[in-house]
Image (cartoon, coloured by chain):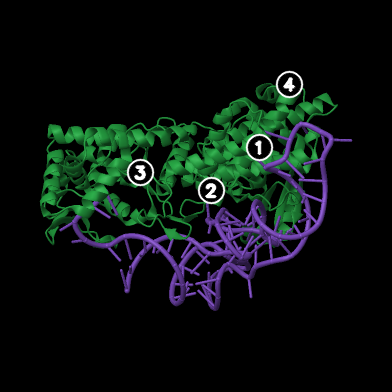
Chain colours: A green, B purple
Amino acid sequence: MDTKALLAKELAGIIGMEAQEIENMFETPPNREMGDIALPCFKLARVLRKAPPAIAAELAQKLSLPEAVREARAEGGYLNFFLDGNKRVRTVLEAVAAKNEAYGSSDKGAGKTICIDYSSINIAKRCHIGHLSTTAIGNALYKIYSFLGYECVGINHLGDWGTQFGKLICAYKLWSNRESIEKGGIDALVELYVRFNNEADEEMENQARAWFKKIEDDDAEAMEIFNWFKDITLRDVSRIYDLLGIKFDSYNGESFYKDKWQSVVAELKEKELLVPSEGAQVVMLEDYNMPPCILLKNDGASVYATRDIAAAMYRKKTYDFHKCLYVVAYQQNLHFRQFIKVIELMGYDWAKDLIHVPFGMVSFEGQTLSTRKGNIVYLDELLERAIVKAGEIIDQKNPELPDKETVARQVGVGAVLFYDLYNSRIKDVDFWWDRALAFEGETGPYVQYTHARACSVLAKSGVSATDALNNADCDYSALDNSEAQEVIALLEGFPQAVDAACEKNEPCVVLRHTVALAQAFNRFYFEHRIITEDGNATNANLKLCAAVKTVIKTGLSLAGIEAPNKM
RNA sequence: GUACCCGUAGCGAAGCUGGAUAUCGCGUCAGACUCCGACUCUGAAGCCCGUGGGUUCAAAUCCCGCCGGGUACACCA
């Protein structure tokens, strides 16, 4: 039983309430001088029919304190507890040592599968900064859920369906050839599509429709070209995924469901949910304060809601997910509410496990993203510039660093991922180069630097992080100072931060906790010598240092950011 | 028009399942490297938490109105 639970049990006995109820009332005081744990007594006033300050004072007197609690002090309506620093230090550091890089992980997700639909790129289009959030957030959630014991399935739900692919093949047949596409790659495809839209006449539009029909009908030639275009796109984007260290478990996109949505439509008809309206087939949702969900166009073709329902059913059947997350921008809020409601109306209770994880829009220096106006930054360009900048700083500050290219990549990519993940998902982001490439303050490189510095101290001492963590000869009184205690409190809170990030589907919770840990460690570092004359005090300091290094590395890794030992 | 989201120091944000003097970074100003990595650290100035009501012992946080910004709303995805 941990300290809070012990305290709660003790208090519950005196007050005459459930221990769990008391435990839920505990808070952390706004600052350390006020204590480590606080019990606000205001709610108790009604039950005990006394003024809160009197209750706090009385409890402080009657309470017999658990071993790990040094003092209980009544302050106003609060009862504040001060933990025994040495015992707390020992408990926390031993907890980190016991799990090492798995500290903060758990098995709460054991046996449960989470599908995560993210990144979901479009075929024959280049990735730009508008695709960064879905990719970064989805990847971070994948890592966080995995860390908590869930089985994750990363799904890149490719945008590979629609008449534009008929247009693309038509344009290719008219104006291009295999060689120049192989050579020009994705840019050549984009160019063809733009040209088609500028120049196409009635005849060409008809041809395009015919080509799309051939894709629908699995025509050999059409499928060969279509799949080839897909390969080119995936080959191009794989450079970005490689840089980010991202892999997917499935690339089943929209076209995968071209022969699977028909049964959904049949089922909707059978359940009398589908009704004709203005030529289309829709499910009416006015009872739920939503416009109708269109499932078949007036020409009988499917729309994306149809395919999304088919995909959800396929995923449920294939993976039997505990939850299925969709990391998609908030513009699609209504769409998700609609098709999830339709699945619910079909009678599937697992509709509640389909969770839209929305995020905000990206603009570029105050302007809407627009290829035409040039208000666009491509993802590969962004990553490249970040890596180049990191390389320049290394050349300037640490020219002797071994394996500079790798470190430049880790730092550059880390800066970009951090920039995207540090704030709440839902906020719109206005992209500015100098912000995305900032390396000081609350940034990825700052946290990475702190990690490298901790590594450096350990290297200097000649002890590995693991040995430092497991060293039993520690004089913990060396850590009896406010800077070290602050670090300890943050190490202690790390598992809860990971858990909260998972519950809220908010990677920024872990990242912010990790930044706070780095800041606290830097303050400790400046106020106190780590390596001193006193061997056992040094061992305690090094143990703290190793714990910080380990937890920072974990925190960054959950955001998909690497932590080099030197930079 | 309807629905949803956002509005916290000059700028970018955290805090939003209500609790003690509202926190962090950038920028500004003043400091700290013979010493374990200055991509660092210390200090100062700067917020009536968009606004008006309400609920409560207690509101940045919950409810209602208004203002400002954004997104979506039938056969694109």
Q: CA distance from mark 2 to mark 1?
A: 20 Å
Q: Chain of mark 2?
A: A
Q: Nearer the viewer, mark 4 or mark 2?
A: 2
Q: For mark 4, what is the residue?
A: A462
Tell me the amino acid under the disc marked 3.
Arg
Q: CA distance from mark 4 to mark 2?
A: 37 Å
Tell me the amino acid under the disc marked 2.
Ala
Labels 3 & 1 near each other (Cβ < 8 A): no
Question: Mark 1 and mark 4, same subunit?
Answer: yes
Coordinates of residue A531 in the picture (x, y in percent)? 79, 29
Q: Residues within 10 Å of mark 1 (few under 14, many from 20)?
A: few
Q: Earlier in the sequence, mark 1 or mark 4?
A: 1
Tell me the amino acid under the disc marked 4.
Gly
Q: Earlier in the sequence, mark 3 or mark 1?
A: 3
In the picture, residue A7 is in which quadrant?
A: top right
Q: Earlier in the sequence, mark 2 or mark 1?
A: 1
* Residue in front for this viewpoint, A334 or A394: A394
- Say whether residue A510 is left or right of residue A214: right
Q: For mark 1, what is the residue?
A: A396
Q: CA distance from mark 4 to mark 3?
A: 48 Å
